[in-house]
Image (cartoon, rainbow, N blue to C red):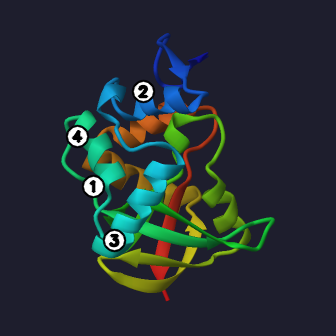
Amino acid sequence: MTSKNLPGAGSTTHDRPESTAEKEEFSSGGNRHLILLRGKVGLAIDTFVLWLTGYSLMTKQYTHANGLPYQPTLLLYTTGARSGKRRRCGLPYFRVDGQYIVRGSNGGGATDPHWCHNVRAHSDARIRIKGRTKRIEAHVAAGEERARVFKALSEMGESTEQYQAMCAPRELPLVVLREV
């Protein structure tokens, strides 16, 4: 892990996760032993169950490991920024002002997740939520909109601020998904 002095955290030094194992350790609140579904097989199982039922086993295990309630999860379908191929991933979401919001935390890693690059390149996307697929326009919130969304997410719980601190100096992408 890389040591990093975090803005707004005084002189506290935090470790930034670099490997998948370190991201799992951070995202599970230090309870990595509770994370049973992982890797490509785990993602495939989770994606199938999420598509079929609207419930994410991956999200459940991470929220359980952190002692938090289950966070509703959606499937986001994007177009690859370079490949042009259809991509999908399961993401916990939040509702702010009637819109869906997802965070590009990448487990607290130093770079944005691939799906964020896809959203920046192609805003036209789809989500599958509660058994229904919807067309959406997606964008990374910036400026005043980001400040408003960040504040709303922070009021819902401390995880957004924790991810922002871990991601620093990069800005945690907060992606707004608007139904078309």
- In front: label 1 or label 4: 4
The Cα–Cα distance between marks 2 and 3, rounded to whole angstroms, is 32 Å
Look at mark 1 in the image and give the residue it sits on.
71
The Cα–Cα distance between marks 4 and 2, rounded to whole angstroms, is 13 Å
Identify the amino acid type marked 1: Gln
The Cα–Cα distance between marks 1 and 2, rounded to whole angstroms, is 19 Å
Q: Which residue in the rendered view is the most extreme toward the front?
A: 41
Q: Nearer the viewer, residue 160 or 122?
A: 122
Look at mark 2 in the image and give the residue it sits on.
25
Q: Choose the circle earlier in sequence order: 1 or 4.
A: 4
Disc 2, SS: helix
- Residue 175, how many percent across, how many down? 52, 62
Look at mark 3 in the image and give the residue it sits on.
97
**Is the Cβ of the residue at disc 1 closer than 8 Å to that at disc 4?**
no
Q: Residue at x 50, y 10 (%)?
A: 11
Disc 3, SS: loop
- Residue 85, how many percent across, how many down? 72, 73
Q: Residue at x 22, y 40 (%)?
A: 64
Is residue 61 visible to the viewer in this orientation of the structure? yes
The image quadrant of residue 46 is: bottom left
